[in-house]
Structure formats: structure tokens, C-alpha cells
Image (tube, rainbow, N blue to C red):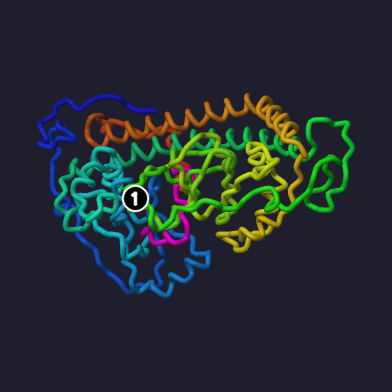
Amino acid sequence: MAVASAYPNYRASGLPWVPLLPEGWQVLRNGRLFGHRVETGFPDLPILEVSLRTGVRVRDMENLKRKQVMSQKEKYKRAAKGDIAYNMMRMWQGAVGPAPVDGLVSPAYVVVKPYDEANSSYYSYLFRTAAYMQEVNKFSRGIVADRNRLYWESFKQMPSLVPPRPEQDQIVAYLRSQDAHIARFIKTKRDLIKLLTEQKLRIIDHAVTRGLDSSVALKASGIEWLGEVPEHWEVRPLKRWVLLNTRTLGQKTSPDFEFRYVDIGSVQTGRLVKEPERIRFETAPSRARRVLRRGDTIISTVRTYLKAIWYVSEDADDLIASTGFAVLTPGSGVEPEYLGYVIQSSPFVNRVTANSIGIAYPAIAETVLGRFPVALPPTVDEQQAIVARIKMESAPLDDAITRTEDEIKLIREYRDRLIADVVTGQVDVRSWQPGKDDVVDDAALAALGDEHEDVTEEEDVDGED
């Protein structure tokens, strides 16, 4: 997929994060490559947003909260097509990229316009490398380290690499072609995970609606969407089986209390898809309040189409979930893991989405959630037996999902190394020519992003906490 040859000659760069540069490359401060664009008063332009992996794109304005932003568009900054926009607080994580069209970004963002010697797409790749993002941290300023901001005055002082402009253009063409291959690989793997997950859900659905003994007589549950259930099972509202949101971090929590934060982007149905971010209470978003314990099940009550549901199977006293989740703590007579399977089953999830309010960003009230009828076997022993069967039948599918997720992780690591090597001149791509398979589709490149990486709760629509 990649060419792997070094440049013939190098020289010392004077930069600790890339000691050697190809001869012919320069090191200049960003103020020599970019100007600062501060233009407001363009309310008719679309609003743009900066994501961590896929750069800048036009924001979906369908949900109500974002429609309210439209009255403030006069304050938004204009980014011309090709300008680089970055989130002052999150550039160190990769929240930077070139504007695909003329548009607007939040007043909390910085917009820089490239001069002729700078290809903004090349610098978007460079700025996202791990080495450069560490430099961003060094140049950022703020009272609290976790909320440091990279202001224009500091950004313009940062040194950057400057290949000759034709080489920048060639590097961009090469990396985009490699990104296209990688995006197709990731999409194929995600499609496989989706199929495997659907197979697992079929196992869960049957087990938690029919039990293990096919000879057991069924009875009408009295609930149309629930249908028939084994006649000895009990049907009660969810709130009779569980306690809702019983533990909450208070305002008097020590500012230094450090915890792992589970937000909606961390969760897919039945599993975590990324490690929870470790943060301190002092710098945590106000929505980081739900205290989790082993045996809890969490379900998202906002953006319910994501079906973000997770059973907490580990002993931990440092897991805190967003208030965008409802935390279900099983009551007496309820096997915790069985409850987790019931909540992620199709009948329950479909009921949640059907009762959610909103089109683009549907949400459900916890009081509504608590009224949903749930059928459970009357004994913990029977519930545990069903859990054991689900685990046994799902084990090969879980293993396959894990292997596939590892393959995606490895290709991402490969991509990060490739980009770093190419944009810093450790690999020479000047002789590369595109082949017939090197077709770049901007829409397909979206697969490079994490599936939920741009999911934040609505108070963060402007990129600020």
C-alpha cells in the first residue's frame, strides 16, 4: 500500500520532534505560512464543525438546539474554502482541518488562511501527528492544564515543516489515496461487525423472550410489542425491577477526584468501543455525574438511535457516566447481567426508539423508560441459566468481533505511522504515481472517523464545555 524509501540527503532541522529533514525543506513559523482570519457577519453561510479524525465538515442543523444557534450566526467566524480551522481547546487531540466550503465556525475556534506556499491539506495532516500535537500542548496557555487553549498569538509562533509546494501537493495526493484504501478496509470490517452483532442479538432476543425450554407454555403478555412470554414469567414495569439513577456526584466532590468518564461516544450496544477518558472533577463537563458500580446497566436517553447500552461487569469506584445515560441498578430478584441482556434486546430497544421525541436527535424521558413493561423469569437461578446459555452461544461471535476490532485498530496505527513518516520527510513519495485502484471518494473517506467520535451531548454543540 505504501512506498518505503528515504530521501537521498538530509540535514539537521533544529527541531527535537523531527531532528532530520530532507535537503530542500525549510522550517518556518506558522505566521509565515498563515494569516489570521477574523471575519464575522455572514449569517447566510453554513455552519461548520471540526471533528477529531475527519476534519472540518458542514454541520447537521436539523436538531432544535442547533436551530437556536442560528440567531447567533452573526458572531460566528467565516472560514473560506481551504482555510484551516481548529478548536482552541482540542487541537492537541486533532480537532483541526481545512474548510471544504465557505462556512462559519464557533467564536471559540481559530481560522487561519494559507499563503501561497502552504497547502492546507498537507498542514492538516502534519498538525494531526502525535509529535506536532505534543508541540501544541507546549504552546497552549490557560489557568487549568486540562483546558489550555492554543490562541492565534501562540499558533503563529509555532515552527512547522515546509516542503517545496509541489512536494506538499504530491504528499497530499499520496496520503489521500492511501486513506481511500484504508477507509474501504475499515468500512468492510465495520460491516462485518454489524453482521456479527446482529447474529448475537438474535441469540439474546430469543433467550430473553422465550427462555431455554421450548416446551414451556406461553401466555399473552398483554403488551402488543412484547407479545407472548413463558406463562410463569412475571411482567412488570421496568421501574419495579430496577432503581434509576441512584448515585450522583455532588457539587462538593473534591476537585482532584480523578475518574474514567463514560460518554455516549464510548458505548455501542453491549460494549465499550473506546477506553473511557480519565479526567478530574475540576475540569470535567457538568454532565459527568452518574456514578456506576458493577452490575449496573446504562442506556442512552439522548440520541437513542445510537442504541448505546452497556452492562458494567467490572469492579470499579471510578466510573462516571454522562447524564445522557439512565443508570439501571437491579433490585432484589434480578440477576444484573440478565437485566443487561434484556435492555439491549430488540423488543426493548425498539420500544425506546419508538417512544423517543425528536427527529435528528431523539431523546426519551426516564419516566417514560421506567414505565416500559419487562418480562423476567421469577427466579434468579433461571435468569442465570439463560445468561450462561447466551454467553456460550455468543462466545464465537464475541471473539470474531474482538478480532475484527483489533484489525481496525492496527490499520489505524499503520495509518498514523505512515502519515507521520511521509509529512516529516522520512519517506520519499515524489516518484509515486496513482494506479487504477487509487480512486479517492470524499464521501467514502468518512469511514476514517470513529463511528461515534463526533457524538457529544447537546450542551457541547459549539465545541465548548
Identify the secondary structure beneath mark 1. loop
Counting from the top left corner in percent of width and height, residue 6 is at: 22, 25
Residue at 59% x, 44% y is 297
Residue 368 appears in which quarter of the rendering? bottom right
Residue at 42% x, 59% y is 460
Q: Which stretch is magenta?
A: 448-465
Is the residue 198 above or below the residue 391 in the image?
Answer: below
Given the image, on which type of amino acid does mark 1 rest? Ala
Q: Nearer the viewer, residue 454 or 425?
A: 454
Q: Nearer the viewer, residue 202 or 1?
A: 202
Is the residue 382 above or below the residue 324 in the image?
Answer: above
Counting from the top left corner in percent of width and height, residue 414 is at: 37, 30
Q: Nearer the viewer, residue 342 or 400?
A: 342
Is the residue 3 above or below the residue 366 in the image?
Answer: above
Q: Which residue is mark 1?
A: 95
The answer to whether residue 375 is visible is yes
Q: Is residue 81 magenta?
A: no
Q: Is residue 462 left or right of residue 11?
A: right
Q: Main secondary structure of the magenta part?
A: loop
Residue 17 appears in which quarter of the rendering? top left
